[in-house]
Amino acid sequence: MSETLENLSSETRQFPPPADLAANANVKADAYEEAAGDRLAFWAKQAERLAWTKPWDQVLDWSNPPFAKWFVGGELNIAYNCVDRHVEAGLGDKVAIHWEGEPGDTRTVTYSELLKLVSQAANTLTELGVTAGDRVMIYLPMIPEAAVAMLACARIGATHSVVFGGFSVEALATRIEDAAAKVVITADGGYRRGKPSALKPTVDEAVSRTDRIEHVLVVRRTGQDVAWTDKDKWWHETVEQASPEHKAQPFDSEHPLFILYTSGTTGKPKGILHTTGGYLTQTSYTHHAVFDLKPESDVYWCTADIGWVTGHSYIVYGPLSNGATQVMYEGTPDTPDRGRFWQIVDKYKVSILYTAPTLIRTMMKWGDDIPAKYDLSSLRVLGSVGEPINPEAWIWYRKNVGHERTPVVDTWWQTETGAIMISPLPGVTAAKPGSAMTALPGISADVVDDQAQSVPNGGGGFLVLREPWPSMLRTIWGDDQRFLETYWSRFGAGSSAGGDEWIYFAGDGAKKDSDGALWLLGRVDDVMLVSGHNISTTEVESALVSHPSVAEAAVVGATDPTTGQAIVAFTIPRGNVDTAGDAGEALIKELRNHVAKTLGPIAKPRQIMLVAELPKTRSGKIMRRLLRDVAENRSLGDVTTLQDSTVMDLISSGLKTAK
Ligand code: 6R9
């Protein structure tokens, strides 16, 4: 990408917060001024929301950048903060987790029960020889034991590494090896799409490929047959029989909490390392601020999987540190039918919902009549994370789920940032559909050109972070050099241009609109270069989704003899749209013109293909790399992180028959 990114779209709609929410909001406009005045004092104040056994001596040590230390010298126990202290405050009978299994079975876990389970699991891990600093892999379905296992590790200072249940043997084995893990916590299986789906055979195979693993703890969830080795122990025969007494020991603020692998676009997965005090401070504060959580009355539901950073920060650590009551759901949104999510919102009177654009667009495809069948009036704040949310998807979400009343908070962050960085505040910000708006108090985000100069309002370029933040990654596990190269060598002090300032390169394109609000434009690697113009995937996709016949779209740049690259779009029509024969051809023509009209002729796709599905990761992100392979007639690259491996066959065979 050369100097800047084209700014093609403009959005004038804006939605101020409802007056009652604004009046009672946890965080008001003065937080921005307070943080701008003294950023470190601001974060120190947020850290005081937690219970520390030893106070810190220094808020931030940035003497060896980009290796940060936050709350230096301080000590705390994360599990104590997420569980014990709520029980000690008399909230033991409060529901921590309303769990809903996919087949319809349920469990209610109070904070007292959570304390018992976490203590028992901590005792069992200790008996198995796990000590502070050891690594434990977690490969579980979305069951309460997933949160229990993470908290038990944190309680004894073991570093957990969660791998999505359903990732391949290869993915699990490389992660075990890279983390040099000693124990795996898994289950016989979990329910997905109405069927038990086995997990244990993958673990058996992965464990046999390395000699690292000493013990495998197995939760019985589905009751399906499992092969048994002498490393295996049932959870119900160990954890559930263990003593419920366990005293949490404090750990240093910089003690490693977890490693979470991100696949990245190429090469070996990166083990993103997060530590204790700064991570909990920022996840806890942002959960309180961005969702306006009122722990005494709200029912919060984040639909993410625990294998994604969103599950770590906004199912486990953020909400539990704030004493929230939350819903946890095991399965897929269309089991037993397409109303499952709304049925859950209705049943538990969910008031704060946090989900991903991919799900919102899927719901758009399925039709407005489905959410309309349920009582969603309990909802008061809606969140989005994972990809840019197209303005029309945002509007659909607010209208059909939020009844034109609830704020929608579009939250930008990454595995690397640990917690939300850019987002509206629901009681403060007049949000624009499709924009993550502004950096949160205490965070300094900017958009720069390739010379690291801040772009003016109306300009586009690279998203960067200019100041260290409490929940930032500390390194890539075992690979400081790669940490430096990936995030710190593009701009500023760590780059060849040098300078005094250490600038974090997020890898995302972004623009500032005429008011300075931030718009995320997709990964820099996906930017298309068409006749000398840098065009973001997001703007073209959003233009397609703004057409009433389109539910979802993914665009890629494919090599083109005249324009260098040309735009190729893969488009999923909405459920009621006729695409057979001539109707399909007519729609394609109309869509190409619609994009040209909305964004200008430069953005007109060369080709549009109508498809039924798009390739996505387990966290719901579109894998444009694979679509580029299709558009350029190559054989497919690495597909190990694909959620559903049949999707690519479907797309390729659909294209062949269409030709
Ligand atoms: C939390 C999470 C990080 C990448 C990030 C960006 C994309 C996430 C977004 C968003 C636009 C948002 N992303 N949230 N893009 N608007 N609100 O998703 O972490 O899985 O590490 O992905 O996701 O491209 O760089 P992770």
Image (cartoon, grey):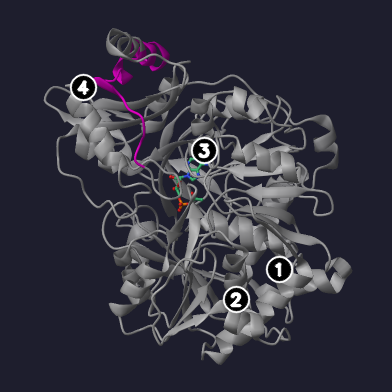
Q: Position of residue 651 (x, y in %)?
A: 27, 34
Per the rendered image, the range of residues in magenta is 591-615
Residue at position x 76%, y 38% from top?
427
Can the viewer see residue 251? no
Could you say whether the residue bearing mark 1 is in a helix, strand or loop?
helix
Q: Residue at x 70, y 46 (%)?
A: 291
Q: How far is disc 4 from disc 3 in space, using C-alphas?
A: 27 Å
Of 433 and 121, which appears nearest the observer? 121
> Of 617 and 604, which appears nearest the observer?
617
Alpha-carbon span between mark 1 and mark 3 = 29 Å
Q: CA distance from mark 2 to mark 1?
A: 10 Å
Residues marked 2 and 1 touching at CB (< 8 Å): yes
Distance from Cα at disc 2 to Cα at disc 4: 53 Å
Select label 4 or label 1 by which is in front: 4
Asked if disc 1 and disc 3 are in contact, CB closer than 8 Å, the reply is no
Which circle's residue, 2 or 4, is located before the other in the chain?
2
Give the mark nearest the N terminus, 4 or 3. 3
| Mark sitting earlier along the chain (1/3) | 1
Q: Are marks 4 and 3 in contact (CB under 8 Å)?
A: no
Q: Point out the frontmost of discs 3 and 2.
A: 3
**Amino acid at the residue labelled 1:** Cys
Q: Nearer the viewer, residue 496 or 231?
A: 231
